[in-house]
Image (cartoon, helix red, strand yellow):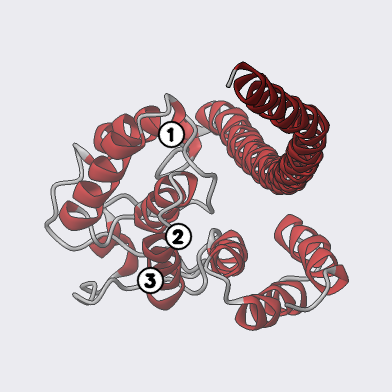
Amino acid sequence: MKKTLASRFKARMSMAGAIASAMLFAVPALAQDESRLSLADRVARLEQQLQSQDQGGIGMVNQVQQLQSQLQQLQGQIEELQHQVQELQDKNKAQYADLDARLSKLENAGAAGSSTAASTATSTGQDGTVPMQPAPAASSAPAASGAPAASGAPAAANGTPAAAPGADASGAQPAYDAAFSALRGGKYVEASRGFRAFIQQYPNHPLTPNAYYWLGESYYVTTNYQVALETFQKLLSLFPQSDKAPDALLKVGYSQIELKQVDAAKTTLGAVASKYPGSKAAGLAQERLRRLQSQPAG
């Protein structure tokens, strides 16, 4: 009995040992398989991370390139705006310089004309009145001409309008000087109101063509080119023989340029040069016309 039990115990122990041995051999194999699977997973994960990083890097590069392109466009726009601002500044300086030169010339002419006021029926204004040929004063015009003046702004021999009969011109010169002084002081709105009031009150006065011209200048300097164009054209229509006609026609051309009416401006500037040869307006018209013709089309 004891022998049987002992043999059975030994058999069981040998079986347990075999099972243990089998398990010892199986566990490393399983562990090795698991490690292999884990390594593959890790490699796959790393590859996915690298792909994500590559895609992110490409996206960053694209964004940087887009930003650089936008920056270049903005720089180009800024340079263009700076160029336009510089052109406007140069244009304004030229306009003011031209206006100041004209005013100074007129002021000097007015000072020279005042010394001969006693020998002429009318004198040049002290504050920059445009010099004109002597014209009869408003109160003496009918007597001097020997016939009543017509009501439609009659012109004297030099093209300036004769004063309307019976018109009170005593306040004409002060009104004109006040508007002109405002123009010289850069008060363009006040000047335009003054010249408009002068034209309305004294439509036949010898200074009316000048009032039209400086009214147009007040509009032109403030870049109101369409109204300036109409004002200069009105002067030429009413007083084509006025001393201000060459300058008015020149400013018609300038206004057309600013209004992008280039073809009409070229025709006008050519008319100034051909109609008033040798005048300062003709020289300025020819110079501006050359500049227009040298510019590329469009």
Q: Residue furthest front?
A: 1
Q: Residue at x 30, y 55 (%)?
A: 205
Spot occupied by residue 284 in the image (x, y as percentages of width and height): 76, 58
Which of marks 3 and 2 precedes in the sequence? 2
91 or 147, which lies in front? 91
37 or 42, which lies in front? 37
One can see residue 107 in this view? yes
Q: Which residue is mark 3?
A: 234
Kind of residue sitting beneath label 3: Lys
Which of marks 3 and 1 precedes in the sequence? 1
Q: Residue at x 69, y 44 (%)?
A: 63
Q: CA distance from mark 1 to mark 3?
A: 23 Å
150 or 247, which lies in front? 247
Side of 136 where 26 appears, left or right: right
Kind of residue sitting beneath label 1: Gly
- Quadrant including the N terminus: top right
Q: Quadrant of residue 47?
A: top right
Front tag of 2 and 3: 2
Q: Secondary structure at mark 1?
A: loop
Kind of residue sitting beneath label 2: Tyr
Q: Quadrant of residue 125?
A: top left
Answer above or below: position of 15 versus 234: above
Q: CA distance from mark 1 to mark 2?
A: 28 Å
Q: Which residue is mark 2?
A: 225
Side of 133 where 94 appears, left or right: right
Q: Quadrant of residue 56?
A: top right
**How many labels were placed on the picture?**
3
Q: Which residue is mark 1?
A: 125
Front tag of 1 and 3: 3
